[in-house]
Amino acid sequence: MAKKELLKVEGLKQYFPIKGGFLGRTVNHVKALDGVSFTIYEGETVSIVGESGCGKSTTGRAILRLEEPTEGTVEFQGTDLTKISKKEMRKFRKDLQIIFQDPYASINPRQTVASVLNEAMHIQNVLPPNQRRARIEELLETVGLRPYQADRYPHEFSGGQRQRIGIARALSVDPKLIICDEAVSALDVSIQAQVLNLLEELQEEYGLTYLFISHDLGVVRHISDRIIVMYLGKIVEIADKTSLFENPQHPYTKALLSAIPVPDPDAKKERIILKGDVPSPIDPPNGCRFHTRCPFATDKCRTEEPQLRTSDLMKEGHQAACHYMEDITNGKMQPNY
Amino acid sequence: MTQQLENILEVNNLQTVFATEGGEVRAVDGVSFVVPKGKTIGIVGESGSGKSITSLSILRLLAKNGKVNDGEILFKGKDLLKLTDKQMRDIRGNQISMIFQEPMTSLNPVYTVGQQISETLIIHKKISKQEAMKQSVDMLKLVGIPSPEKRVKQYPHELSGGMRQRVMIAMALACDPEILIADEPTTALDVTIQAQILELIRDLQNRLDMSVIMITHDLGVVAETCDYVAVMYAGQVVEYSDVRTLFKNPKHPYTLGLLNSLPRHDVDQEKLIPIKGMVPSPHDMPVGCRFAPRCPVATQACHTKPPMLESIGNNEQIRCWMYSEEWDGDSEVTLYGEKRTVKG
């Protein structure tokens, strides 16, 4: 199967200035993203997972230029989105849509559903105005709502239904890539399953590509083809779904997977409990950023930054950034708690 | 189970109502469960199922417009609902403590951590300030906070989320409570920090021999921490059993639906089977079984007659017509892709 590149992110950096001191000068930076590169192919679902502050949402926002990235390139079908003007970028927003976490905050409460969807189509000039009403009703049916609900206001809907409106809005402009930023995290499990199934059906029907940003590894395992694990502004591991869950290589990925409670009281598991908290992204640790919490860390980890690479124990396309991943997997290195 | 466990807390037919603009709302309607000594019982349910209101009712911490209408809450045989406010204050924070989801909003930002832990100690143990501060340091050490002598003088904003939750736990445990109510204690935390906190609660429970009521929406947390589980839906307990039975042989259609909706990180699943529809509004509860409008096997009777929470075996209770003699549906039903034979 020939895979076609849809989005290629290279060396993406996002430094947010911290103002302070005399005359509000920039005194420091929050290094939210520090050199992130990955590729998304057409029709696949790539997920970015990680804990708070790892930079997963920032990545999504930087791709869409909701915040201008500090450095790096974002190539969408061959065009570098970071180099074009704001006006040109607006045209690309038709192809790149985003669904946010909080369906209560991301839809204007004073607009009816029809006017929310109409606005999106109007800005992108998707359909002649006289055909839009029919399209709006069709979209609502597509996402599992009723056509007569088009003239209702957001407060008349539940959280799950609002998320469906968010999906309908994204779909209204026929996008190629949808970034789902914690799109199902605020929903109860029974509703979450409904929305996840809907996203999968829409992908099949419209050939959509998803960049799925989530902290929930259950959701990620369910929906993804490939997974990117981030820690403190860097990618620590990237792999297809099976490799990541069955053969994780980076100690952080292993700890993350082992930390999730399993809904099975008989499950026997070895839990790797990480000590301490994630360090501040203002002054990230030297060397490997994970070394302050890693049970395997050596002096080399404290000084030399590991690069993403594929070891003999990994499948093609599976990469992790750890100096000692072979020795850890082989059991030659013992954790030091 | 053959050994007789002493029940430290017994909730019988609890009914909590709230006066709202749209009329009276029964947030909790007929909740019963027991908490055996030294064990953990989980109360699991989705938003609006009444799990938090149940715990607030136990501690009599309801908002002004809420009140317990009916039922009893027996703590070591004494009905907490019949106590005076003063008697209740002696129990709250002393014999029954609670930790909340959001440690930042439950800690007072203008007092140091040490002052807040000391307050509980001074009130309940009637000890001096100095002695209380010394014990606060010990408590911080107990909950695994590094350099407690320094931390005790810090303010909540100087601590990370995980640390704050540890402080909350230290405060809750300062007076050696017999029951700890943990209301979504790890929901606001990242998974690696969640693992630390759950480990800590388990470890302290063993050391201090207390009972824990774990309120959560996360079935993973239930499976890992609880001995018994009460599943709540729309203000009622729909299933109560030991944790193994609940996960290996769930009986209520809602419990089954919940387990089938859950995306798992440890196994591959073909497709999730969601529960259709959504939770009924508390202003407009179905007259029959509250789950009937969403239930794949509901019969005419389910829509008209509310089922009771019935014992169906050792330490197992269920609120569903399917397991009663009066079941008028098929004797074999398919629930979320799974065939099962029921009474008929």
Image: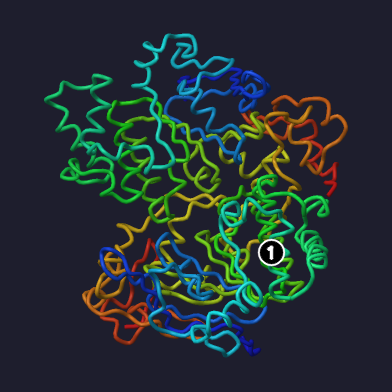
Instruction: Give the secondary structure at mark 1.
Output: helix
Q: How is the image coloured?
A: rainbow
Q: Position of residue B299 (x, y in %)?
A: 24, 73
* Residue shown at 70% from the left, 55% from the top: B196
Residue B160 seen in this snapshot? yes
Q: Residues within 10 Å of mark 1 (few under 14, many from 20)?
A: many
Number of dots carrying numbers: 1
Question: The residue under label 1 is which amino acid type?
Answer: Met
Towards the viewer: B31 or A205: B31
Q: B83 above or below A326? A: below
**Left or right for B64, reference A261:** left
Q: Quadrant of residue A110?
A: top left
* Residue shown at 47% from the left, 72% from the top: B54
* Residue shown at 61% from the left, 26% from the top: A33
Q: Position of residue B17 (x, y in %)?
A: 36, 73
Towards the viewer: B324 or B33: B33
Q: A4 above or below A118? A: above
Q: A139 above or below A86? A: below
Protein chain holding label 1: B
Q: Quadrant of residue B89?
A: bottom right
Towards the viewer: B155 or B205: B155
* Residue shown at 53% from the left, 44% from the top: A221
Q: Which residue is mark 1?
A: B171
